[in-house]
Image (cartoon, helix red, strand yellow):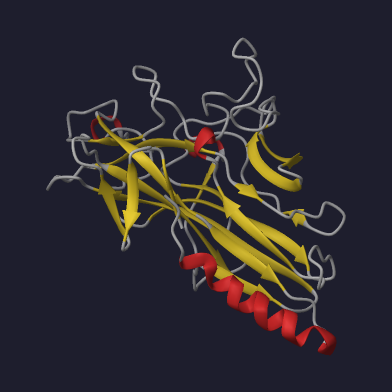
């Protein structure tokens, strides 16, 4: 289920279609996935009893408009959001929320439910300080309570607030900062440069969900895990929300700029009850929405 920053681009049969006369551009696909074991990652999981821990990860893939290949991801800022959040029943597990690769802000990409959580090395080249760590903001939007991950000072919903307010969240700079050093600047004590451009694991976090907390008429609820397009970092030169990739070994800034598409994941909660069999079946089918795409 894709959403694109390119207003004139739409998805047709799973592909990005660009209207005639519009200049096409490379695209970065930001994908959220969920897991119940930290090993198998899927777009949707169904919870039917008890209190369950669900791991979430964000990955990035480069989709070229032409036959080009960047050297590796330079940076991307975004703010994960979780809809249908129940603050009395659900919780966000702790993750590496302060610092850089060298100061504990980055973690290794390991399998399993005991794996460390946070930005995956080497993508914690920059990071928040202890005075402004990453934080789970609980807030209402569109009549629904959400959990949103961003810096503590970035208290407004993406795109809200006056432009003169440093924490207004209009430019995406207060989100999860994914950044690695350029190839030429990687030092001996730095994590290795990641040249992968497909399914690059950027960030992991985990949610503890109580299935007893219902939200729908039948007691179930669906938690969408997404990133609003307004939360993607802006390019300072053009104002367009982009991801940047290093074009070659001499590129130190990420000269390859791409539009961003977001593919959301979801958690379908179906309270265990014989009387909800019909509702459960409907919600489980609805849970397969994870493969749909937004334009």
Q: Is residue 114 visible?
A: no
- Say left or right for 212 vs 99: right
Residue sitting at x 74%, y 75%: 270
Residue sitting at x 85%, y 70%: 212
Above or below for 289 versus 56: below
Tally of numbered discs:
0
- Say left or right for 291 vs 139: left
Pick whichever, 192 or 23, lies toward us. 23
Q: Position of residue 237 (x, y in %)?
A: 34, 17
Q: Quadrant of residue 103?
A: top right
Above or below for 18 versus 99: below
Q: Position of residue 289 (x, y in %)?
A: 53, 68
Q: Residue furthest left?
A: 67
Pick whichever, 89 or 135, lies toward us. 89
Q: Residue furthest bottom?
A: 274
- Say left or right for 119 vs 88: left
Q: Residue furthest front?
A: 20
Q: Position of residue 261 (x, y in %)?
A: 40, 46
Residue sitting at x 63%, y 78%: 284
């Amino acid at each position: 289920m894709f959403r694109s920053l390119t207003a004139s681009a739409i998805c047709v049969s799973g592909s990005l279609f660009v209207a005639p006369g519009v200049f096409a551009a490379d695209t970065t696909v930001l994908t959220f996935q969920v897991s119940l074991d930290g090993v198998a990652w899927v777009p949707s999981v169904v919870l039917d009893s008890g209190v369950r821990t669900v791991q979430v990860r964000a990955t990035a893939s480069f989709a070229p408009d032409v036959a080009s290949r960047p050297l590796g991801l330079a940076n991307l800022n975004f703010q994960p959001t979780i809809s249908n959040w129940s603050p009395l029943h659900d919780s966000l597990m702790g993750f590496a929320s302060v610092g850089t690769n060298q100061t504990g802000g980055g973690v290794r990409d390991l399998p399993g439910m005991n794996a460390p959580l946070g930005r995956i090395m080497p993508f914690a080249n920059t990071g928040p300080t202890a005075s402004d760590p990453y934080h789970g903001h609980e807030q209402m939007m569109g009549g629904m309570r959400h959990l949103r991950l961003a810096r503590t000072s970035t208290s407004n919903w993406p795109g809200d607030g006056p432009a003169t307010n440093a924490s207004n969240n209009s430019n995406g700079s207060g989100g999860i900062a994914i950044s690695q050093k350029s190839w030429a600047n990687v030092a001996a004590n730095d994590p290795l440069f990641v040249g992968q451009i497909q399914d690059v694991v950027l960030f992991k976090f985990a949610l503890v969900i109580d299935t007893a907390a219902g939200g729908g008429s039948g007691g179930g609820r669906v938690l969408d895990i997404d990133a609003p397009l307004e939360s993607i970092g802006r390019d300072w030169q053009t104002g367009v929300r982009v991801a940047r990739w290093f074009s070659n070994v001499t590129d130190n800034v990420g000269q390859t700029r791409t539009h961003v598409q977001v593919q959301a994941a979801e958690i379908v909660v179906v309270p265990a009850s014989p009387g909800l069999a019909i509702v459960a079946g409907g919600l489980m089918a609805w849970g397969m929405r994870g493969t749909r795409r937004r334009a």
